[in-house]
Amino acid sequence: MHINEQLKDRITHLSNLPTLPQVASRLMKIINDPLTSSSDAAFVIGQDLSLSAKVLRLANSAFYGIPRSITNLNNAVVILGLKVINTLVLSLTVFDLFPESRSSAALFDRKAFWLHSLSCGVAAKLLVSKSKKLILFDPEEAFCTGLLHDIGKVIMEQYFHEDFHEALKTAKNENLPLFKAEQKIMGFDHTDVTQWLTQTWNLPSEIHLPLIYHHKPSKADTHQDIIFLCHFSDWLCYETGMVINKKYPAPDLDPGSVNILQIQPDDIVEIKKELDIELKKASAFYELAANG
Ligand SMILES: [Fe+2]
Ligand SMILES: [Fe+2]
């Protein structure tokens, strides 16, 4: 995967690029080692006290719905599992990496951005439970993919502030999906930025590829099911109004989506209904991640 040339030109002049904090990258590395024990993972997370507190509070929240209380990190890892803990830490870390900025709320409301991201994560998790194609796919990875799918927009807001705001205006005035307006103004879009941002993060392909291909799912050579899952979840968010700003039109749905994911029209109706209930549970995630 090569990085867009225009983007490459601009990022070489930037300093202070966001890198994934130690704890998350360390955890990402050890998670795939079969010799890693729950206490190894708990030890790594324990290096960051504020993160540890958030992990514990979230593990005890309605979001995971564990009936008994989890009192220490080791228990949290044992009960939730290494994969869940890994995606949980990754999601919390990314939230922390991009605190509220000088953004002009009318055009790019950061809270609305995270709520759209959260809805996409929840929709992806629900779809995993309905799609016959995704039966073996991990619902927490699906959630993480949805949560992070548009992360490039936050980087654009931070590093290419004026151009990004120009793209926001163009999307609204010319009735273009935001990623197309970004391409028009900058020659690249938020998925290119995500690709550049995450290239050193060692994300598993199941999480990484949907972030890059969610606006062009049929262009991917591998992992199409999971990429279509993210693409469809994003579309569902537009269908249900869970978007950053209703003035930006929805990206087109790839017509192959329903077939590839093997979902029935009834499932879609059902997911739209469940989305609302699940989002209420997931709001604990936003409150904790954003406000600590
Ligand atoms: Fe997107
Ligand atoms: Fe999106």
Image: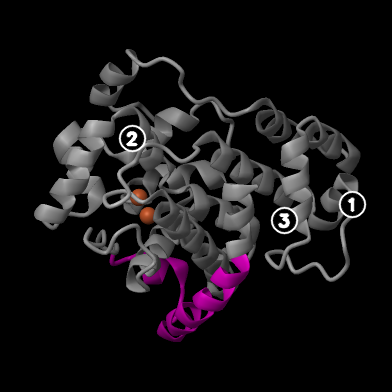
- Residue 202 sits in quarter: top right
Q: Position of residue 98 (x, y in %)?
A: 49, 37
Q: Which residues are magenta?
A: 255-282
Please tell me which residue is depicted at 29% across the width and 62% down the height of the picture: 254
Residue 228: quarter of image: bottom left
Instruction: Residue at 71%, 28% (x, y): give it.
Output: 26
Estimate the x, y position of residue 105 in percent, counting from the top left.
Answer: 32, 49
> Which quadrant of the figure contains the N terminus?
top left
Label 3, label 2: how far apart the Cα atoms are: 29 Å
Residue 156 numbered mark, or none: 2
The residue shown at (51%, 52%) is 147
Q: Amino acid at mark 3?
A: Leu
Q: Tag 2: residue type?
A: Met
Is ligand 1 within 8 Å of the beta carbon of the residue shown at mark 2? no
Disc 1 residue type (three-letter): Asn
Residue 19 colored magenta?
A: no
Q: Which residue is mark 3?
A: 58
Vertical placement of residue 58 versus 1, above or below: below
